Image (cartoon, rainbow, N blue to C red):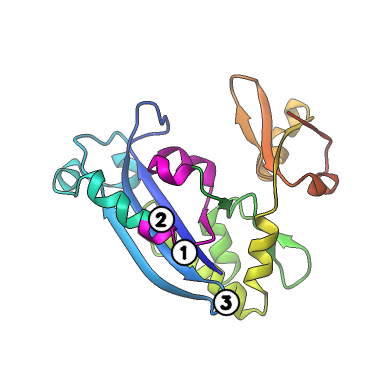
Amino acid sequence: MNILLLDTETTGLDPLVDRCIEVACCLYDTTTASPIVSYSSLIKHDANAAEPINRISVKSLLNAPDEWEVWPKVLNLADKAECLVAHRSEFDRLFVNEQLRDRRWVCTKSDVQWPDLRGGTVAGDHLVHLSLFYGLGVVSAHRALTDVDIMVRVFTRVAELGFDLDVLLMLAMRPKERFVALVPYERKDEAKKLGFLWDADRRQWYRYMPPEDTPLLPFQVRRG
């Protein structure tokens, strides 16, 4: 299948006030474990409160293309893909063009069961840690194109190790429901490590996951 690996950089964490200022994506063929075509662009804006993290200067943003020039190119690639794949996809999904939000998404942090040659699976909490686990070097991070490149190389390395990427992705694309972790405060880090997110309004740790995977968790959950 074809998948679209995607990453964004934003001016902050709140989609109600912050903006996407960079997007990168790569159409990737899982059968041949090969990238097909890549696209990356800054998006014009006049501020970037997250510059200390992503190092995208306001000056460069002022010279960037408008969003109406950028998103159609991303949509064109998305139309050729079975799903969009992002690390911590719940974040990127909030900042992309609205026509992309209702597509099928896979999160490389919480949906993909990364294989370990020693048996079992590898925690995909941090993209850099995942890359280093598979013996891949990391030159830089916190830019959309470099993070997409890391995802490309991780998928390719997993295929080189003899694992079927189509099977990996089909498992990741299974229907999911919202589950709440029934854990005391002192076990919150355990829930976080397993992909659960903090809902400040409801004051609960939650995760969207296939119901059949919940018995594998080291704590109880409930639908919610």
Q: Can you say which quadrant of the picture contains the C terminus?
A: top right
Rounded to the nearest angstrom, the CA distance separating label 1 from label 2 is 9 Å
Q: Which residues are magenta?
A: 76-101
- The mark closer to the camera, 3 or 1, is 3
**Which residue type carries mark 2?**
Ala
Identify the secondary structure beneath mark 2: loop
Residue 188 in the image, given as x and y percentages of width and height: 70, 33
Residue pictured at 59% horizontal, 22% vertical:
200
Tell me the residue that label 2 is attached to: 141
Cα distance between the residues tagged 3 and 1: 18 Å
Say which element carries label 3.
loop
Q: Which-is-in-front pick, marks 1 and 2?
A: 1
In-image side of 221 versus 147 (left or right): right
Total labels drawn: 3
Q: Are marks 3 and 2 in contact (CB under 8 Å)?
A: no
Pointer 3 with pointer 1, Cβ within 8 A = no
Residue holding disc 1: 150
Viewer-nearest residue: 49 or 62: 62
**Other-residue count near label 3 (Cα within 10 Å), few / some / many at <14 / 14–19 / ≥20:** few
40 horizontally vs 152: left or right: left
The tag earlier along the polypeptide, 1 or 2, is: 2
Determine which of the numbered discs, if any, sits on residue 31 in the image. 3
